[in-house]
Amino acid sequence: MSNLRSLVAKVPKAELHLHIEGTLEPELAFAIAERNGLALPYSSVAELRAAYRFANLQEFLDVYYACAGVLIESRDFYELTWAYLERARDDNIRHAEIFFDPQTHTARGIEFPTVVEGICGALEDGWRKFGMSSRLILCFLRHLDESDALETLAAAMPYRDRVVGVGLDSGERGNPPRKFERVFHRAREAGLVPVAHAGEEGPAEYVREALDVLEVVRIDHGNNALDDPDLVAELVRRQIPLTVCPLSNLKLCVVDDMASHPLKRMLELGLVVTVNSDDPAYFGGYVNDNYVAVAEALGLGEADVVKLARNSFEASLLDEADRTRLSGELTAALTSLERSDGSKP
Ligand code: HPA
Ligand code: ZN
């Protein structure tokens, strides 16, 4: 299995499901809190890490929103994003599609431009220094109401050149996609690409609504879509990608254990599956850890790992030329691996 870890480390990949606020490691949270003269509701890094035991999505969200409360200045958002990009580079991530939750910050009086400018400053440096491309996706908090989301969309309009898509996150149960029909309609009219979290804790019906009502091009998570064979058939037929997050699913009790994760079944069904880290500071691993954990538990082989990496580029929002270029990097990496160890991945 160490061979598989080394293969995972060596293949170039894209990350397509990553909440930037979910990359806030406890050490950085405390450092930023101190600089901003704020206190976290935990006395130490160890006490905060000890709080990372979640029985469901909401228990996680409570800690995640509390920690995000230390982010005040553009510099804080820059440092948060930069730390993620350095970590992602170590995992051979060549392209990242990054969610941010503006309402988590604007509700505390932080201006939208402060957030976006800090994040984008780091993304630009990631491109210049690492050649890592990125796209920014604005997520609406689905536990808040439509008017709040509409205001947030309006605040994003001057940043149309930097925000390429809209998503939907936060507590899923009781907050169906149709609640945001008009918001997504307006976002699509403005040329933003629609995606949505669906089928993480919510039913297959929410995945159906995300497709039919929000007209999303990609589903974040999507696990519970498997309960509806007609829906699966449509996802396969239309090749709608799923951004699956194995360690997140384990930590949030979406699956009982990794051995019962549906990822292998999803691949066998012909779904366009990708592997992602979601909120890696909280869920115990970045992208490579997710690949290895799910591959070990489900007995995935080298061809599966390569397929998942290939899917990550194919399912990205990049244009065809960039998808082809990155997929070519993957092919070149495999060729050089074959040459160096004589084995065929
Ligand atoms: N699900 C819903 N909302 C979120 C998540 C998630 O996994 N991470 C951050 N916000
Ligand atoms: Zn997520």
Image (cartoon, grey):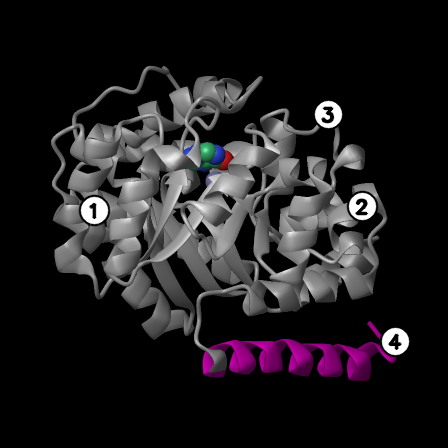
Looking at the rendered structure, the secondary structure element under dot 1 is: helix
| Mark in the foreground, 3 or 1 | 1
Label number found at residue 296: 2
The residue that appears at 63% across and 24% down in the rendered structure is: 253
| Mark in the foreground, 3 or 4 | 3
Question: Which residue has dot 4 on it?
Answer: 343
Looking at the rendered structure, the secondary structure element under dot 3 is: loop
The image shows residue 100 at horizontal and vertical percentages of 33, 45
Q: Amino acid under label 4?
A: Ser
Task: State the CA–CA distance, disc 2 to disc 3.
Answer: 16 Å
Q: Amino acid under label 3?
A: Asp
The residue that appears at 57% across and 59% down in the rendered structure is: 91
Task: State the CA–CA distance, disc 4 to disc 1.
Answer: 51 Å
Question: Which residue has dot 1 on it?
Answer: 153
Label number found at residue 256: 3
The image shows residue 77 at horizontal and vertical percentages of 25, 46
Q: Is mark 4 within 8 Å of ligand 2?
A: no
- Whether residue 22 appears in magenta in the rendering, the answer is no
- Whether residue 340 appears in magenta in the rendering, the answer is yes
The residue that appears at 68% across and 61% down in the rendered structure is: 308
- State yes or no: discs 3 and 1 in contact (Cβ < 8 Å): no
User: Is 303 left, or right, of 156 in this rendering?
Assistant: right
Question: Which region is colored magenta?
Answer: 321-345
User: Nearer the N terminus, badge 2 or badge 3?
Assistant: 3
